[in-house]
Image (spheres, rainbow, N blue to C red):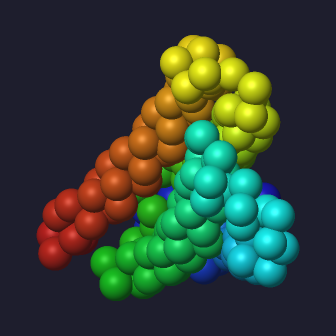
Amino acid sequence: MAATTHSSAPWHDEEYVKYTLWFVFACIVYSLIGFSWGALMGGIPEFRHFVDNRLFGKLIVRAHTHINLLGWVEMAIFAAVYYIIPRLVRRAIYSLRLVKLHFWIHNLGLIGMVVFFTTAGVIGGRASVTMPPAEVEQLVKPWLAVMGIFGTLVLLANCIWAYNIFRTCAGWRSGR
């Protein structure tokens, strides 16, 4: 694989192209999951009733929302920016290592958020049938705490992306 250098054109770096395309592929996968999930929630009356009427059932809707926003939309934006910025500033991305970190941390964080939002929603929704709301809230709290940890990973990944793009663009007129 070609190494990233600041003097080479980014579209000649196979590893950089591969990761840019992985963001596109992730976008496609997350969009298919998110769109299907939304269709199921809207199309299956029992599912819709569960998320609309059970205590903490809305957390399942939040999982769906996050897979669409952080999966479909953000991955498309990341891919587009990774593709466009090096061409605009006429130099390679500041750090391929940061691109890779961004990809893996963001995906780990997003998948964790979706899993734990959904788990909390299912547990809370089912428990709300037989337990008082205060007890259900205590039951769901640890799941949401873990979800928050994964959300922090997504935030970290977004900061890595912003830093990498900023460093790529900084001083672009001077040619670095």
Q: Nearer the viewer, residue 19 or 127?
A: 127
Return the x and y of residue 15 as percentages of the image width and height: 71, 62
* Quarter of the figure with the N terminus: bottom right
Query: In the displayed structure, does residue 132 sit left or right of residue 1?
Result: left
Residue 105: x %, y % from top left? 61, 41
Q: Residue at x 61, y 59 (%)?
A: 52
The tally of labels here is: 0
Where does the image place residue 116, in percent across and percent down from the top left? 68, 35
Q: Is residue 93 above or below residue 130?
A: below
**Left or right of residue 1, residue 59 in this image:** left
Residue at screen point 72% across, 66% down: 48
Residue situated in front as seen by the camera: 161 or 7: 161
The C terminus sits in image quarter? bottom left
User: What residue do we see at 62% from left, 54% from top?
Assistant: 53
In screen coordinates, is 49 left or right of 134? right
Q: Is residue 20 above or below residue 66?
A: below
Q: Give the residue at x 75% y 26%.
A: 130
Q: In the figure, residue 173 lies in which quadrant?
A: bottom left
Confirm whether residue 153 shows in the render: no
Could you say which is closer to the camera, residue 33 or residue 117? Answer: 117
- Whether residue 57 is visible here, answered yes or no, is yes
Residue 172: percent from left, percent from top: 22, 70
For the residue pair 27 and 2, the one nearer the viewer reads as 27
